[in-house]
Every structure is written in structure tokens, then in C-alpha cells.
Amino acid sequence: MRAKLSSKTQAPKTTRPHMPGYGLPKTKKGLLPWKWAEDRLNKSRQYWIATTRPDGRPHVMIVWALWMDGVLYFSTGSKSRKAQNLAKNPHCTMCTEKADEAVILEGVVETETDVARIRDFIRLYEKKYKWKLGAMADGLLTLKEPVFYLRPKMAFGLWEKKFATSATRWIFK
């Protein structure tokens, strides 16, 4: 399940994150390649998702997800707090599970309406998690329950082992 860049996302611009006081180099030497981030996005089992409640309070939860074609796909029940938050404010942040090799995506979540893409999502999701969606799949395929994807606008790669030289920010168009 190797994600590729598609028309949904283009190759990101690689830069240093703005982190005053951390002593990061001014040069591009040591920046992480986007492949480093994609490898971790593909391998992560759980992903943290941070959304905003209607009253402005943050909400953080764990979801299962798939990195497919340059976006991060996931599903959650339409009545879940995550889905309700995203309906009001589609901006969110999602992170891989390993904080010592963190990939953090910031962007806007959209709802997938292409049933062929949802079929791909279900097939790959069931393979990755070794878990059959069963009746839940019917709700996804009939668009009664949402399949979302996060289109990154910005991403960060923070590798604890080489943090001082490798802290990276990717900017997407």
C-alpha cells in the first residue's frame, strides 16, 4: 500500500520549521525527505486527530487511517464528536502514533463521495487492520456514513534521534 502523489497533492516544498530558541540550522542540510514522512504515514497503525468543538475547545482522539494517494483517509460515525466537529470546522491536525519519529499533518478534511475510492479504502483498510468492516462497509458505500480525507496544507517531521539537524516542515500548494 504505497501512496503516491496525485492530483490531490503535489510534491511539497521542504523547509525548516519556525522554532525560535531551538538552535535549528539555517541551511537545508539534514532536512528530511518527504519519503521519510510517507513511510511513517504508511506504517502508523493509530493516528491522533485533533478537531475543534463548536465552542472552541479542542478535541483529540485516536483513529485508524490510511495514507492513500497523498491524503490521509479515515472514517468515523456521522454522530461522533469528531464528525460533528468537522462538519462545523473542517480544519484539523492528524499525527502518526510514534512521537519519537513524528509526522504531523495540518490541513482541511473533506468527505469522499466517490464510491470507487471508498471501495479502495475499505479493501485496503480491511487488509491493513485485518478487520472486516461488515455492515459498516454498507453505510460507507451508500454514503450514509462518512469517509473523510485530510488534504495536508503543511506537515512537520520531527525525528527525536536527529532533531537538532533534521526538524523539517513541508508546505503543500
Image (cartoon, helix red, strand yellow):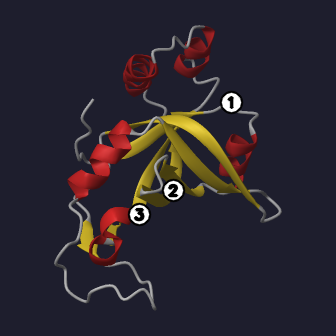
Residue that carries the numbered disc 2 in the rendered image: 108
Amino acid carrying mark 2 in the image: Val
* Residue type for callout 1: Gly
Query: Residue pushed farthest top?
Result: 134
Asked if one can make out residue 172 in the rendered structure from this viewpoint, the answer is: no
Q: What residue type is labelled 3?
A: Lys
- The answer to whether residue 115 is visible is yes
Question: Which of the two discs, 2 and 3, labels the residue nearer the N terminus?
Answer: 2
Q: Quadrant of the C terminus?
A: bottom left
Q: Mark 1 points at which residue?
A: 77
Tell me the residue at 52%/18% (across/down). 141
Residue that lies at the very extreme toward the right in this rendered image: 55
Q: Residue 63: horizontal and vertical position, in percent?
A: 58, 37
Badge number at residue 151: none
Residue 76 placement: quadrant: top right
Rendered image: mark on residue 153: 3
Tell whether 23 sits left or right of 12.
right
**Is residue 48 placed above or below 142 in the rendered structure?**
below
- Look at the numbered disc 3 and give the secondary structure of its residue: strand
